[in-house]
Amino acid sequence: MSHTPHELAEEFPDHVEKMSALKQSDAHFAKLFDSYHEINRSVHRAETNVEPMDALAETELRKQRGALKDQIWSYLQK
């Protein structure tokens, strides 16, 4: 499988340990984290035509991914 862009460890490299700790200690953060990765994989599959989708659906997934990333960033800033 090719490299998936926008992995959280690459987006927030200085916060990898904190993300790992939050996944273990905060159920809401763990759900955000898992949802982000699920949507990120869907976007990547659409972009690489592994699972093509119409442009509107792909754009909506990107918006959802961005919103989740913003929520995760908020957690990391606490």
Image (tube, helix red, strand yellow):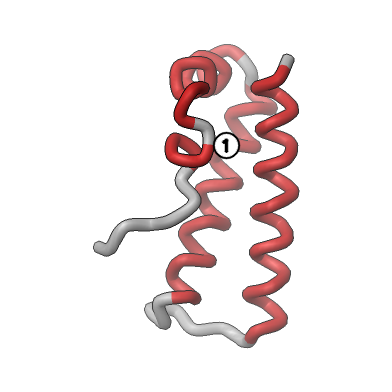
Please say if 73 is above or below 10. Answer: above
Among the 4 quarters of the image, the one containing residue 22: top right
Toward the viewer: 4 or 12? 12
Q: Mark 1 belongs to which amino acid?
A: Phe
Toward the viewer: 13 or 49? 13
For label 1, the crowd category at 10 Å Cα-Cα, with few meaning under 14, some 14 to 19 and many 20 or more, is: many
Q: Residue 38 at x, y = what percent?
A: 52, 53
Residue at the spot 49% in from the left edge and 51% down from the top edge: 6
Please say if 18 is above or below 40. Answer: above
Among the 4 quarters of the image, the one containing residue 2: bottom left
Q: Quick check: 69 left or right of 8?
A: right
Q: Quick check: 46 left or right of 55?
A: left
The residue wearing badge 1 is: 33
Task: Residue at the far bottom: name it.
Answer: 54
Residue at the spot 57% in from the left edge and 57% down from the top edge: 39
Residue at the spot 51% in from the left edge and 22% down from the top edge: 15
SS class, disc 1: helix
Please say if 5 is above or below 18. Answer: below
Q: Residue 29 at x, y = what percent?
A: 64, 27
Q: Residue 52 at x, y = what percent?
A: 49, 84
- The N terminus: image quadrant: bottom left
Residue at the spot 54% in from the left edge and 40% down from the top edge: 34
